[in-house]
Image (cartoon, rainbow, N blue to C red):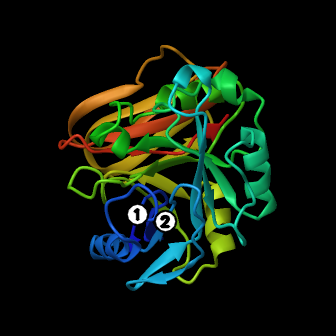
C-alpha cells in the first residue's frame, strides 16, 4: 500500500501473470513471492484455461483469475484473449466457444472480463463493436514488448473505440511469462480501495475507474468546466489524447513537470492523459467522458 499525493490509500495490483500451470516459467508460489517482495498488494494468476480461486499465497493476496484465448495466432482472423477476474466460480467455457459466449459466462459468474493486449492481438474497433460485456481493457502489456511482437501499447485501439462511444477502464499489466527481468513487476494499477476490501469491492473499484495505470509515475486527471488538468509526480512529458486529432496545449515537455492543463474543444467527447518520466516509464489516466 502507498499513500498518493492526495493522501488516498492505493493498492498495488497486477492482474495478469502466468505460472508453470500453463506457459509461465515460475510456480505460483515463486511468482507470488516475487510480487510480494516488489511491494504488490494483490495479484491475479491467470493461467490459460485454468481457473485459480482467490486466496493467499506466500503472504500475498490472490484474486481469482484465468485467461481464455481463442483464434489461434493469425491476427487477421480475430484473436481474442479474455481475463476472467474475480469470478465466484470457474467459468464453464470451451475452446470452441465464441468470444461472446466466453464474455457472457465470465459475467454470469460475477467476474470482470478484460480484453487483454488488443494491440498484440491486432484487435480492431470493428472486431469488438458487436461484443458486449467487456469490462476493461489493457492499455499496456509488458510482455508484449519484452518478448512478443513489440506491440505493448494499445492507445490507438482505446482511442478509436472511445470515438465510437465505447469507453473502457484502462489497465496496465505485466502478463508475466519469463521472470527474467524483462516482464515481471513492471506495470500495474494503483487502486483506490481498502486493504481488506472483498473481491467484489475490488472489481467495483476497477469498474468505476478508481485507479491509475503505471510503470512508476503517479497521475491524476480532473475536469473543471472546459478545462482539464493533470497532476502527477515529476515527469518529463505530459500528453492529452481525445477525439481531436489536433489541438493546442496537448503535450508539454520539460524537467520535473508536475501539472499541465488544456482547454476542451466544443466537439470533444472524451479525453485521457499520459505522463512519461525521465527514465521512459509511463503512467496512464482513465478516460473522462465529456
Q: CA distance from mark 2 to mark 1?
A: 8 Å
Res. 66 image quadrant:
bottom right
At which x and y percent is residue 58?
38, 84
Q: As drawn, which residue projects farthest toward the top? A: 246
Q: Secondary structure at mark 2?
A: loop
Position of the C terminus, as image quadrant, is: top right
Left or right: 275 with respect to 116? left
Q: Nearer the viewer, residue 278 or 23?
A: 23
* Residue picked out by circle 2: 45
Q: Position of residue 32 (x, y in %)?
A: 37, 74
Examine the image and state in which quarter residue 86 appears.
Answer: bottom right
Q: Residues within 10 Å of mark 2 (few under 14, many from 20)?
A: many
Give residue 59's quadrant in the image. Answer: bottom left
Instruction: Name the residue beneath numbered marker 1.
Output: 19
Residue at 43% x, 52% y is 173
Residue 269 visible, this orientation: no
Q: How many marks?
A: 2
Q: Mark 2 or mark 1: which comes first in sequence?
A: 1
Q: Are marks 2 and 1 in contact (CB under 8 Å)?
A: yes
**27, above or below 23, in the image:** below
Q: Nearer the viewer, mark 2 or mark 1?
A: 1
| Residue drawn where x is 50% and y is 75% of the image | 62
The residue depicted at 50 percent of the width and 64 percent of the height is 191
Q: Nearer the viewer, residue 162 or 151?
A: 151
Residue 67 position in % (x across, y down): 57, 54
Residue count near mark 1 (Cα–Cα under 10 Å), binned few <14, some 14–19, many ≥20: many
Amino acid at each position: 500500500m502507498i499513500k498518493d499525493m492526495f493522501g488516498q490509500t492505493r493498492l498495488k495490483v497486477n492482474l495478469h501473470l502466468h505460472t508453470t500451470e500453463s506457459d509461465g516459467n515460475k510456480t505460483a508460489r515463486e511468482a507470488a513471492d516475487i510480487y510480494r517482495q516488489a511491494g504488490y498488494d494483490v495479484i491475479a494468476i491467470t493461467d490459460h484455461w485454468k481457473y485459480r480461486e482467490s486466496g493467499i499465497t506466500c503472504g500475498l493476496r490472490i484474486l481469482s483469475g484465468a485467461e481464455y484465448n481463442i483464434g489461434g495466432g493469425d491476427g487477421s482472423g480475430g484473436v481474442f484473449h479474455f481475463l476472467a477476474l474475480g469470478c465466484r466460480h470457474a467459468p464453464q467455457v470451451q475452446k470452441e466457444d465464441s468470444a461472446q459466449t466466453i464474455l457472457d459466462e465470465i459475467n454470469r459468474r460475477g467476474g470482470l472480463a478484460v480484453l487483454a493486449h488488443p494491440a498484440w492481438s491486432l484487435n480492431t474497433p470493428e472486431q469488438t463493436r458487436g461484443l458486449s460485456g467487456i469490462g476493461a481493457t489493457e492499455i499496456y502489456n509488458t510482455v508484449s514488448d519484452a518478448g512478443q511482437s513489440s506491440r505493448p501499447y494499445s492507445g490507438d485501439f482505446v482511442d478509436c473505440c472511445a470515438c465510437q462511444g465505447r469507453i473502457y477502464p484502462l489497465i496496465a499489466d505485466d502478463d508475466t511469462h519469463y521472470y527474467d527481468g524483462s516482464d515481471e513487476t513492471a506495470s500495474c494499477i494503483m487502486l483506490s480501495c481498502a486493504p481488506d476490501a472483498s473481491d467484489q469491492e475490488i472489481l467495483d473499484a476497477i469498474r468505476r475507474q478508481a485507479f491509475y495505470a503505471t510503470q512508476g509515475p503517479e497521475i491524476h486527471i480532473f475536469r473543471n468546466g472546459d478545462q482539464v488538468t493533470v497532476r502527477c509526480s515529476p515527469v518529463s512529458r505530459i500528453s492529452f489524447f481525445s477525439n481531436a486529432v489536433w489541438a493546442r496545449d496537448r503535450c508539454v515537455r520539460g524537467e520535473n513537470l508536475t501539472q499541465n492543463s488544456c482547454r476542451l474543444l466544443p466537439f470533444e467527447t472524451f479525453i485521457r492523459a499520459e505522463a512519461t518520466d525521465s527514465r521512459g516509464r509511463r503512467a496512464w489516466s482513465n478516460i473522462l467522458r465529456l
